[in-house]
Image (tube, rainbow, N blue to C red):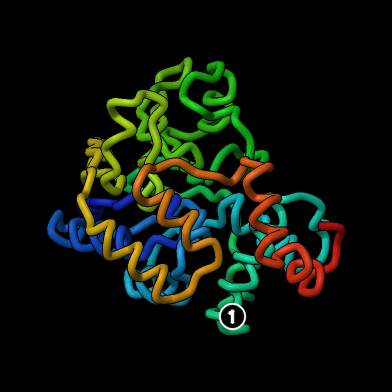
């Protein structure tokens, strides 16, 4: 069969934010995309898990990757990650909450998904990863990092797409291959304050015609943040007040050890995480 023009919606870093995903999928439909690729970090800290799975499944993604948050959830659930600090207690409590929404079959599907894969579209070889090929976590592909990490990501391919940094990015390798990050659907970020105030949902569209010619379009989609906050509070998501703060400001508390230690102690999350998963909170 002859190649036809493909319009691929690149999605990454939804982080439990179903309201943002719904808005992005509606925009992607209006843009007449022909395929969906998801680059990881579907769950946490937002309230949705099963709802997000259902929305993505309805798109029949050609690529569906895990991110570092799925990796952390799997390690916590398997007992291979000790719950030995405030951030890990936070992740453990949220993991327990999300898992209760997922069937055993859905959890097995999470465990089976890769962090990186390669696809060929109309003659272009494309590496899709959550972060680097080596690991789904780490900072080597943050926008200001050295060129060598980007060269390694796209080595042997025409194009690489990745998530993790929550920042929209397009740059070239040392040899001119293309590297694209669509930004974050559910938790956009920029170190530049003027841009960080814009909390619209991010994604990107790759258009690859029959001859393998490529265009990239970055999209930013407004959504009802107050509706997402209400959804979280109605669903009694753990740390709902911190999630409200995240949605209203864009600022995370994942690494605020002092704040999380106090909240975990006051709300009994230390003991709950230990009872659920073991470890030394």
Position of residue 269 measured from the top left corner of the image (x, y, whole percent): 70, 65
234 or 154, which lies in front?
A: 234
260 or 174, which lies in front?
A: 260
Position of residue 247 measured from the top left corner of the image (x, y, whole percent): 37, 51
Mark 1 surroundings within 10 Å by alpha-carbon count, few (fewer than 14), some (14 through 19), many (20 or more): few
Residue at 47% across / 58% down in the picture?
241
The single residue placed furthest to the front in the displayed view is 266
What kind of element bears circle 1? loop
103 up-or-down from 275: above or below: below
Give the quarter of the image for residue 188. top left
114 or 80, which lies in front?
A: 80
Q: Is residue 11 visible?
A: no
Give the quarter of the image for residue 107. bottom right
Task: Name the image quarter holding the N terminus.
Answer: bottom left
Would you name the residue on which mark 1 appears?
100
Position of residue 158 measured from the top left corner of the image (x, y, whole percent): 42, 33
Residue at 35% across / 72% down in the picture?
55
Residue at 66% across / 65% down in the picture?
267
Residue at 62% across / 41% down in the picture?
256
């Amino acid at each position: 069969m002859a190649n036809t023009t493909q319009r691929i919606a690149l999605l990454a870093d939804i982080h439990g934010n179903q309201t943002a995903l719904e808005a992005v999928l509606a925009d992607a439909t209006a843009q007449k995309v022909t395929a969906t690729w998801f680059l990881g970090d579907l769950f946490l800290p937002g309230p949705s898990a099963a709802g997000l799975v259902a929305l993505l499944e309805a798109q029949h993604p050609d690529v569906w990757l895990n991110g570092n948050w799925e990796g952390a959830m799997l390690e916590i659930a398997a007992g291979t990650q000790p719950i030995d600090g405030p951030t890990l207690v936070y992740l453990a409590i949220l993991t327990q909450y999300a898992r209760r929404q997922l069937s055993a079959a859905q959890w097995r599907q999470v465990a089976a998904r890769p962090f990186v894969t390669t696809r060929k579209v109309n003659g272009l070889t494309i590496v899709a990863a959550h972060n680097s090929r080596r690991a789904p976590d780490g900072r080597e592909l943050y926008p200001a990092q050295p060129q060598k990490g980007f060269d390694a990501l796209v080595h042997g391919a025409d194009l690489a797409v990745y998530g993790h940094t929550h920042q929209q990015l397009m740059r070239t390798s040392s040899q001119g291959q293309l590297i694209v990050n669509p930004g974050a659907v559910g938790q956009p970020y920029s170190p530049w304050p003027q841009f960080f105030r814009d909390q619209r949902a991010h994604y990107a569209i790759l258009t690859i015609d029959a001859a393998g010619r490529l265009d990239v379009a970055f999209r930013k989609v407004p959504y009802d943040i107050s509706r997402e906050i209400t959804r979280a509070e109605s669903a009694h998501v753990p740390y709902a007040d911190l999630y409200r703060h995240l949605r209203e400001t864009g600022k995370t508390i994942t690494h605020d050890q002092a704040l999380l230690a106090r909240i975990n102690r006051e709300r009994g999350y230390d003991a709950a995480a230990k009872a659920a998963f073991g470890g030394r909170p």
